[in-house]
Image (tube, helix red, strand yellow):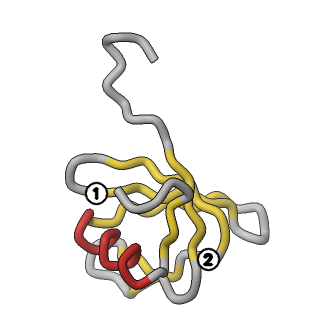
Amino acid sequence: MSQHDTTPAPRHATVHGHVTYRVGDGPDLPIPEGRVELLPAPDSVTLSWTAANGAAGRAALPRSQYEQYVQRGGIVPDDGPH
Protein backbone atom coordinates (compact mmCIF):
# COMPACT_ATOMS: atom_id res chain seq x y z
CA MET A 1 0.00 0.00 0.00
CA SER A 2 1.42 3.44 -0.84
CA GLN A 3 1.75 6.15 1.78
CA HIS A 4 -1.15 8.01 0.14
CA ASP A 5 -3.51 5.04 -0.03
CA THR A 6 -5.93 5.24 2.91
CA THR A 7 -8.22 2.40 1.83
CA PRO A 8 -8.08 -0.33 4.49
CA ALA A 9 -7.09 -3.81 3.37
CA PRO A 10 -10.03 -6.18 3.07
CA ARG A 11 -10.50 -8.81 5.75
CA HIS A 12 -12.38 -12.07 5.53
CA ALA A 13 -15.01 -13.77 7.66
CA THR A 14 -17.54 -16.58 7.67
CA VAL A 15 -21.28 -15.97 8.00
CA HIS A 16 -23.11 -18.51 10.19
CA GLY A 17 -26.88 -18.66 10.57
CA HIS A 18 -29.36 -15.83 10.11
CA VAL A 19 -27.57 -12.61 9.05
CA THR A 20 -29.53 -9.96 7.15
CA TYR A 21 -29.23 -6.51 5.65
CA ARG A 22 -31.76 -3.95 4.50
CA VAL A 23 -31.80 -1.74 1.41
CA GLY A 24 -33.51 1.53 2.28
CA ASP A 25 -36.94 0.90 3.81
CA GLY A 26 -37.23 -2.52 2.16
CA PRO A 27 -37.44 -5.92 3.82
CA ASP A 28 -34.55 -7.68 5.52
CA LEU A 29 -32.58 -9.68 2.95
CA PRO A 30 -30.45 -12.68 3.90
CA ILE A 31 -26.69 -12.82 3.53
CA PRO A 32 -25.88 -16.42 2.58
CA GLU A 33 -23.85 -18.56 4.95
CA GLY A 34 -20.23 -18.97 3.95
CA ARG A 35 -17.18 -16.87 3.20
CA VAL A 36 -17.40 -13.09 2.83
CA GLU A 37 -14.93 -10.29 2.30
CA LEU A 38 -15.09 -7.43 4.81
CA LEU A 39 -14.21 -3.86 3.97
CA PRO A 40 -14.38 -1.76 7.15
CA ALA A 41 -15.11 1.97 7.18
CA PRO A 42 -15.43 4.26 10.21
CA ASP A 43 -19.23 3.93 10.41
CA SER A 44 -19.96 0.69 8.51
CA VAL A 45 -18.60 -2.62 7.28
CA THR A 46 -19.26 -3.76 3.71
CA LEU A 47 -19.65 -7.50 3.16
CA SER A 48 -19.11 -9.00 -0.31
CA TRP A 49 -19.85 -12.57 -1.33
CA THR A 50 -20.59 -14.87 -4.24
CA ALA A 51 -23.93 -16.67 -4.02
CA ALA A 52 -24.38 -20.35 -4.90
CA ASN A 53 -25.68 -19.34 -8.34
CA GLY A 54 -22.51 -17.30 -9.00
CA ALA A 55 -24.16 -13.91 -8.48
CA ALA A 56 -22.11 -11.33 -6.60
CA GLY A 57 -23.64 -9.80 -3.49
CA ARG A 58 -22.70 -6.79 -1.43
CA ALA A 59 -24.18 -5.18 1.67
CA ALA A 60 -23.07 -2.31 3.89
CA LEU A 61 -23.98 -2.88 7.54
CA PRO A 62 -23.91 -0.08 10.09
CA ARG A 63 -20.95 -0.76 12.38
CA SER A 64 -23.28 -1.29 15.37
CA GLN A 65 -25.25 -3.99 13.52
CA TYR A 66 -22.04 -5.66 12.32
CA GLU A 67 -20.69 -5.73 15.89
CA GLN A 68 -23.96 -7.30 17.14
CA TYR A 69 -23.62 -10.09 14.56
CA VAL A 70 -19.97 -10.65 15.59
CA GLN A 71 -20.90 -10.76 19.29
CA ARG A 72 -23.58 -13.41 18.72
CA GLY A 73 -21.43 -15.47 16.33
CA GLY A 74 -23.36 -14.71 13.14
CA ILE A 75 -20.24 -13.21 11.55
CA VAL A 76 -16.88 -14.72 12.52
CA PRO A 77 -13.90 -12.67 11.28
CA ASP A 78 -10.86 -14.80 10.39
CA ASP A 79 -8.59 -12.60 12.52
CA GLY A 80 -10.99 -12.07 15.41
CA PRO A 81 -13.33 -9.15 16.13
CA HIS A 82 -12.17 -5.59 15.39
Q: Residue furthest top?
A: 3
* Disc 1 to disc 2: CB gap under 8 Å: no
Give the percent coordinates (x, y) of residue 1. 46, 18
Q: How many badges with numbers are in the image?
A: 2
In 3D space, how far apart are the residues under numbered discs 1 and 2 (Cα atoms)? 19 Å
Amino acid type of the residue that numbered disc 1 sits on in the rendered structure:
Ser
Residue under the point 34% across and 11% down: 3
Q: What residue lies at 23% left-to-right and 70% top-to-bottom?
A: 64
Residue 27 in the image, given as x and y percentages of width and height: 38, 87
What secondary structure is marked by label 1? strand
Quarter of image, res 71: bottom left
**Image location of residue 19, percent across then percent down:** 48, 82
Quadrant containing the C terminus in the rendered view: bottom left
Crowdedness near tag 2: few (<14), some (14–19) or many (≥20) residues, C-alpha within 10 Å: some
Left or right of residue 15: residue 23: left
Q: Which mark is residue 44?
A: 1
Q: Is residue 32 left or right of residue 30?
A: right
In the image shown, does 19 or 81 lie closer to the viewer? 81
- Residue at label 2? 32
Looking at this view, name the residue that lies furthest to the front. 80
In primary-sequence order, the first of circles 1 and 2 is 2
Residue at point 57%, 73% (across, down)? 15
Q: Nearer the viewer, residue 59 or 78?
A: 78
> Mark 2: which amino acid?
Pro
Q: Secondary structure at mark 2?
A: loop
Taking depth in this image into account, of 59 and 17 the one nearest to the observer is 17
29 horizontally vs 51: left or right: left
Q: Residue at x 34, y 82 (%)?
A: 26
Above or below, 8 relative to 77: above
